Image (cartoon, rainbow, N blue to C red):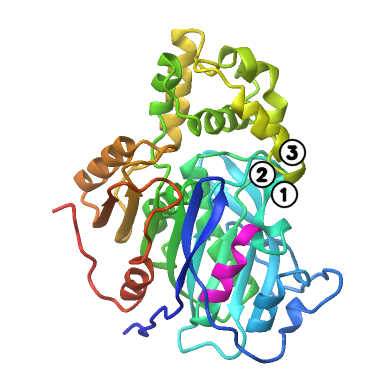
């Protein structure tokens, strides 16, 4: 029987993108000594007893002395890692991330796991949560979940924080990254159990959804109890037609620019000039930036974008982009575990109709989904009050409400 754990922390909104947020718990501070792996000073290598081989094996691990003080004082063991992910059809990749457990003795069966898939932070290596003392805000999530008795795995995604090219909004690649972050967590900290839940918003919502689909076949040694996807970027193919007719929202244009730049970095055959005109072409480098020192230039460039600056210049270019976005989309197959999907009908990043269609497809596959379509909510103000209870119920083994019926 599963150990019943209740997430008792109150909820706050954690912004991960301008206009984008996910709901995370904040736990009360626990007094006590700081775990040795997060002591102050310079990062030091950590010796991993058995770094392993293949998916989830460890390339490197080091201490996190610059982790935010509130997290260090709450009582955690922590490591920044580079781990391997072996994606079928792609091969072995190296991905960075951060992993955490509560200090002290683990319960019978080991610490249960929350795998957090972060929202959009950019497409440059410097824009990784692991490179930030606050984990780009996710340290609050770590503190809340570890205080509640969970281990936490946070992938940066491939190409963020470590060499490689980031596969922006490629849900499938990100899904593998999420799963192998859990394996990496268990490689570094052997007292972590096999039960886990995936949780993400926006870009991370799509990643958590994909991880749910992949888990049963890719990681049968792990027991996924459920996945939460807030405002998920499940299927973004609709961006193409909106770019053609000039109806992209002010939020979707910059998003599409990052998609195109990410695709071009991974596929040298893609000609960006097939998709950029006017100020988009002129300001391309400024639009690509994601670090704080480039934020002002990017904001100014966004304001100069024209309605059809990202319109494909031929039918062939449009079809190629549709095919690329379709390959990134979910669903691809049935889910491994129940899922909670919460999204707003006023989302200016991800049209609600796109999420509606993805959910209809997933329901047709037989998925068990709790659907929370929120009237008047946008991308960053989705109400996540139900998240903690829903996750806690899944670890407790309770059946999930199925709104596909």
Q: Which residue is mark 2?
A: 159
Quadrant of the frame with the N terminus: bottom left
Is 35 placed left or right of 360 in the picture? right
Residue plotted at (62% across, 20% down): 280
Of the residues tagged 2 and 3, which is closer to the observer?
A: 3
Where residue 62 appears, x then y in whole percent?
A: 76, 68
Residue 365 visible? The answer is yes
Residue 56 shows in the view: no
Outermost residue to the right: 42
N-terminal of the two: label 3 or label 1? 1
Does 220 sit left or right of 297 as displayed?
Answer: left
Q: Which one is earlier in the sequence, the residue at label 2 or at label 3?
A: 2
Residue in the image at 62% along x and 18% along y: 272
Q: Residues within 10 Å of mark 1 (few under 14, many from 20)?
A: many
Q: Can you say whether 173 is above or below 13 in the image? A: above
Query: Foreground: 127 or 216?
Result: 127
Residue 321 painted magenta: no
Q: Which residues are magenta?
A: 136-144
- The overriding secondary structure of the stretch rendered in magenta is helix
The residue indicated by pointer 1 is 162
Q: Quadrant of residue 70?
A: bottom right
**Depth check: 49 or 38 in front?**
38
392 with respect to 165 (left or right): left
Instruction: Measure the alpha-carbon separation of dots 3 and 1.
Output: 20 Å
Residue name at image x 50 percent, y 82 percent? 149
The label on residue 294 is 3
Crowding at dot 3, Cα within 10 Å, few <14 / some 14-19 / many 20+, comes out as: some
Query: In the structure shown, which secondary structural element does the residue marked by tag 3 occupy?
Result: helix
What residue is rendered at 67% in x and 74% in y? 78
């Amino acid at each position: 029987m599963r150990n019943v754990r209740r997430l008792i922390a109150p909820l706050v909104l954690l912004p991960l993108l301008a206009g984008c947020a996910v709901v995370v718990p904040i736990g009360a501070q626990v007094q006590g000594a700081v775990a040795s792996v997060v002591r102050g000073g310079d990062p030091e290598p950590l010796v991993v007893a058995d770094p392993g081989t293949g998916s989830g094996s460890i390339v490197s691990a080091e201490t996190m002395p610059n982790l935010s003080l509130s997290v260090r004082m709450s009582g955690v063991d922590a490591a920044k890692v580079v781990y391997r992910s072996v994606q079928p059809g792609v091969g072995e990749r190296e991905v960075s991330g951060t992993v955490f457990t509560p200090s002290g003795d683990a319960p019978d069966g080991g610490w249960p796991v929350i795998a957090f898939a972060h929202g959009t932070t950019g497409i440059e290596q410097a824009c990784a949560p692991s490179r930030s003392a606050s984990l780009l805000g996710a340290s609050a999530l770590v503190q809340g979940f570890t205080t509640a008795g969970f281990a936490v795995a946070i992938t940066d995604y491939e190409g963020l924080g470590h060499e490689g090219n980031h596969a922006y909004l490629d849900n499938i690649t990100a899904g593998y990254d999420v799963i192998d972050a859990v394996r990496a967590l268990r490689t570094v900290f052997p007292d972590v159990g096999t039960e886990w839940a995936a949780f993400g918003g926006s870009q991370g919502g799509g990643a958590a959804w994909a991880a749910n689909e992949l888990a049963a076949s890719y990681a049968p040694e792990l027991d996924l109890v459920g996945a939460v996807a807030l405002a998920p970027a499940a299927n973004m193919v609709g961006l193409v037609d909106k770019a053609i007719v000039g109806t992209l929202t002010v939020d979707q244009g910059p998003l599409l620019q990052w998609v195109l730049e990410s695709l071009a970095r991974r596929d040298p055959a893609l000609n960006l000039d097939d998709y950029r005109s006017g100020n988009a072409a002129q300001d391309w480098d400024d639009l690509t930036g994601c670090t704080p020192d480039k934020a002002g230039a990017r904001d100014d460039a966004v304001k100069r974008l024209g309605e059809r600056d990202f319109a494909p210049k031929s039918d062939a270019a449009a079809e190629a982009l549709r095919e690329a976005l379709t390959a990134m989309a979910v669903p691809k197959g049935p889910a491994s575990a129940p899922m909670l999907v919460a999204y707003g009908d006023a989302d200016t990043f991800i049209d609600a109709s796109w999420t509606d269609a993805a959910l209809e497809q997933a329901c047709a596959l037989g998925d068990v989904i709790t659907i929370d379509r929120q009237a008047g909510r946008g991308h960053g103000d989705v109400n996540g009050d139900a998240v903690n209870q829903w996750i806690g119920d899944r670890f407790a083994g309770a059946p999930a409400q199925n709104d596909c019926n």
